[in-house]
Image: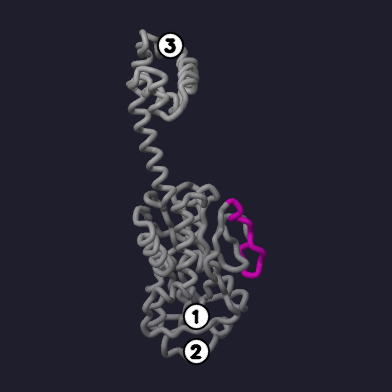
Amino acid sequence: MIEARHLRILRAVAGTGSFSAAARELGCTQPAVSQQMKALEQSAGTPLLVRAGREMRLTQAGEALVRHAAGILAGLTAAEEEVAAIAGLRAGRVRLVSFPSGSSTLVPTALAAMRAEHPGTRISLVEAEPPRSVEMLRDGDCDVALAFRYAGSDPAGPGSGGAGRVGAPAAEGWEDLVVRPLLTDRLVGLVPAGHRLAGSASVRMAELADEPWIAGCPRCRRHLVEVCEDAGFTPRIDFATDDYPAVAGLVGAGLGVAVLPELAVESVRAKGVSTVAVEPAVEREVVALTLPDLARVPAVAATLAELERAAAR
């Protein structure tokens, strides 16, 4: 196999005309140059240099190899510089996928910090709810996934084989991933400002049994039904929407009640809505996920660190 160090020595010999001059140029010994040239000729399977008086001249094969060596060595130098830039966070990219309420709360702070600290690193963002975001990570469509799982629920989502019930043991689904916990996000109740329970310090889920409900995303909707059933009733869902401002707007118009994660409420300017604590407490764990190999990439590691800092604020 032809090695880059052999090509550098060959070019030096071709340029200086002798092993001793090439050794001085390269900062090594003449025997070392001679030994490396023998190794290169063995790899090539043909003589590359011939002695003509006091000078070393290239054979036809040697001339061909020197001609190609310029491009090869230039390409290696460019690759080394690019890798060094990525390792030093002067370049690189991170593909981030996040659920909507994370995109509007945690992500902006983290990305602003990344741009300030590492302006050469490019970060792209797309939105997807888990388990789709986790699938994208495993499929190689992103580098970091911001995701969540409800306490005691299946982290992998529908179809993973988990029970998915509140209070049930969490199904195994993230063992192959690096899981970076960010925060615990509690669900809060949303009721119209004029509702009988508006202003209450806390509300038990059972007190909302007869109310019309506005539900969120499919996974959140499934979890809502489970929480309500654990409280002894099945919710009457009149409206369902993936859009958190729409949920708040429907509640504010007096069309029903809802529960949303605190992150979602933080990202919505709700008019005519009163928020109340819900008992028993229902929480979801917000995490950043990546693959073990990706976790060692400097730009990915920096992004995870900034997401942690954003969550701690």
Q: Amino acid at mark 1?
A: Gly
- Answer few, some or many: residues within 10 Å of disc 2's Cα (few below 14, many 20 plus, some between 14 and 19): some
Q: Are marks 2 and 1 in contact (CB under 8 Å)?
A: yes
Residue pictured at 48% horizontal, 21% vertical: 36
The front one of 255 and 178 is 178
Mark 1 lies on residue: 189
Residue 266: name its quadrant.
bottom left
Left or right relative to 126: residue 259: right
Question: Marks 2 and 1, how far apart in space?
Answer: 10 Å
Q: Which residue is mark 3?
A: 47
Residue 230 in the image: x percent, y percent?
62, 75
Secondary structure under tag 3 reads loop
Q: What x and y, as percent, mark residue 20?
A: 41, 20
* Amino acid on which disc 3 is placed: Pro
> Which residue is painted at 39% across and 38% down in the image?
79
> Is 181 inside the magenta-drawn segment?
no
Q: Main secondary structure of the magenta part?
A: loop
Asked whether 167 falls inside the magenta stretch, the response is yes
The CA span between labels 3 and 2 is 92 Å
* Nearer-N-terminus badge (3/2): 3
Which of discs 3 and 1 lies nearer the camera? The answer is 3
> How far across and how far down the image is residue 18, in percent?
38, 17
In 3D space, how far apart are the residues under numbered discs 3 and 1 (Cα atoms)? Answer: 82 Å
User: Pointer 2: what residue?
Assistant: 197
- The stretch in magenta equals 163-176
Which of pointers 3 and 1 lies earlier in the amino acid sequence?
3
In the image, which disc is placed on residue 170? Answer: none
Percent position (x, y) of residue 130?
50, 59
Q: Residues within 10 Å of mark 3 (few under 14, many from 20)?
A: some
270 or 16: which is nearer to us? 16
Q: Secondary structure at mark 1?
A: strand
Q: Is residue 111 above or below residue 61?
A: below
